Image (cartoon, grey):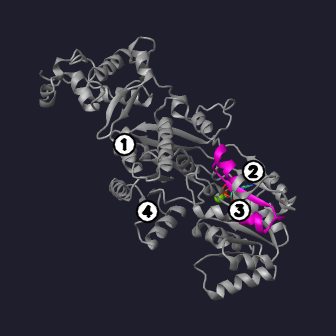
Amino acid sequence: MPKSILKNVFGYDSFRPLQEEIIARVLNNHDSVVLMPTGGGKSLCYQIPAIYLDGCAIVVSPLISLMQDQVMALNELGINALCWNSTLDYTRVQHVTNQLRLGKLKLLYVSPERLTMDSFLDCIKEAKISFFAIDEAHCISEWGHEFRPSYRYLDLIRAHFESLPIMALTATATTRVVEDIQRQLDLTDATVFQASFNRPNLFYEVRRKKNTVQQLFKFLQQFSNQSGIIYCQSRKSVNNLTEKLVKQGFSAKAYHAGLSQIEREQNQTDFIYDRVSIIVATIAFGMGINKSNVRFVVHYDLPKTIENYYQETGRAGRDGLNSHCLLFFSYADKHKYEVFLNQIQNVKEREFAFKKLSMMLDFAAKPRCRRTQLLEYFEEDSSNISCGTCDICKNPPQTMDITVVSQKVLSCIYRVNERYGVSMIIDILKGNKTDRIKYLKLDNLSTFAIETELNKSQLHDVIAHLTFEKIILIDGDEYPVLKLTEAAWRILRDQDTISMPVFEVVKTPKQKPK
Ligand code: ADP
Ligand code: MG
């Protein structure tokens, strides 16, 4: 019985939501697509039927380290599981094939590349196979955040093993990805199981980058000796930040692909066994990490997609206890990525990456409940979820009306014929007689020096907000210039008003000599 395997092999008393139904589905010889957030317990969904059924289950997994971790854990529980990957020498391969042929193996973990090899297919065709599990199945879809071309060849499973059930598992649940998975694997008769993406014990907070290191120190002081992960975008910033934290007396280690493998593994184990509290890492860290008592996840830089953000924050609070997810963002982050994304050659891919980034930015910048935004992104009904545990719900942001200053900004953009960028527009509004402005005679414009209340940095915020609300467009072939959209005209014509969250730090405007 699956239930007794849960108890006797894994030592758990009860199933998590959907696990039992998913297991029953494969035991009845049917296909399924399993959508469950990170940490939801996907592995047991195929491990238990694999142990229960006659023969060996084939588990496709994208990372060697992931396979090895799972195999080790299963072996420790007394389950005969092995992986077959490129690191195996001849004798190990012999061992695997023998175990398969003798019918003693319960789970065999392989990479998608391995599965497509004729020699491998021949080998498993001679053995008794119970079913196929495709882990991290979103890798099959270009719409997922980790597309792996080799996953595309998995359609051969259906072609070669028509009667065996297939279970595809992922933490990504957008309709597009799910459809892709079903189509590519030919899962016409699959039931789609979707567990909730809501993580009620996670508190979501977003802050603007400003004295970020100081803000971070203060934040971390609330978590003395507790475990947490800080994600940075680059190896360099991982190193810098780790150094600063250590200097400040925090227990922190770095993790990124630029460290030697020994050092990386050492730092990771130190973190897992609580010998160090904080791991500062690039996104290279975390896949397959199974640490339940992570109390906070900080994003020191903006993640590139909401999937990334969700997956990374999902590593907090797996034990069900309250945990905190803090994201720092700035529009500068966005511009940095855009430069980077512009280098993507394939037009479709590039547009797609931009779209994902802009959705991530929406999440960070919009004064809307974070949980609702996340669930909406994953197309989950959020209408009967009461949040209360995100920054927006806890402290609803005050907003201020910026219609008048927006009208000044917009008419200024119009007066210069949509030919200049942010700094020029601000200089004109503030009446700065730079050489360029004098040379171009822009000081004759009616909008010259009409903004007296807000300072430069506040005007930057206003323009960023107008861009964000798609009232202004940033465009241009050689350098970015500001342009008006249809929405801008509604504001200029007094048909619409606009407000934004109040400025965080309101400085007294500096008086500049004219
Ligand atoms: P996923 O692959 O969905 O991210 P995992 O399969 O790695 O999640 O499971 C996450 C954690 O939850 C693991 O530590 C696992 O042992 C635990 N877990 C899974 N199912 C149960 C259960 N029914 N009861 C208790 N713990 C469970
Ligand atoms: Mg998993």
- Tag 2 secondary structure: loop
Observer-side mark, 2 or 3, equals: 3
Is disc 4 surrounded by few (<14), some (14 to 19) or many (20+) residues within 10 Å? Answer: many
Is disc 3 surrounded by few (<14), some (14 to 19) or many (20+) residues within 10 Å? Answer: some
- Closer to the chain start, of discs 2 and 3, is 2
Observer-side mark, 1 or 2, equals: 1
Q: Nearer the viewer, residue 141 or 502?
A: 141
Q: Is mark 3 within 8 Å of ligand 2?
A: no
Q: Nearer the viewer, residue 389 or 314?
A: 314
The image's mark for residue 16 is 2
Q: Which residues are magenta?
A: 156-181
- Closer to the chain start, of discs 3 and 4, is 3
Q: Is residue 411 magenta?
A: no
Residue 424 visible, this orientation: yes
In the rendered image, the quadrant that contains the N terminus is bottom right
Where residue 372 sits: x, y (%)?
A: 60, 33
Observer-side mark, 3 or 1, equals: 3
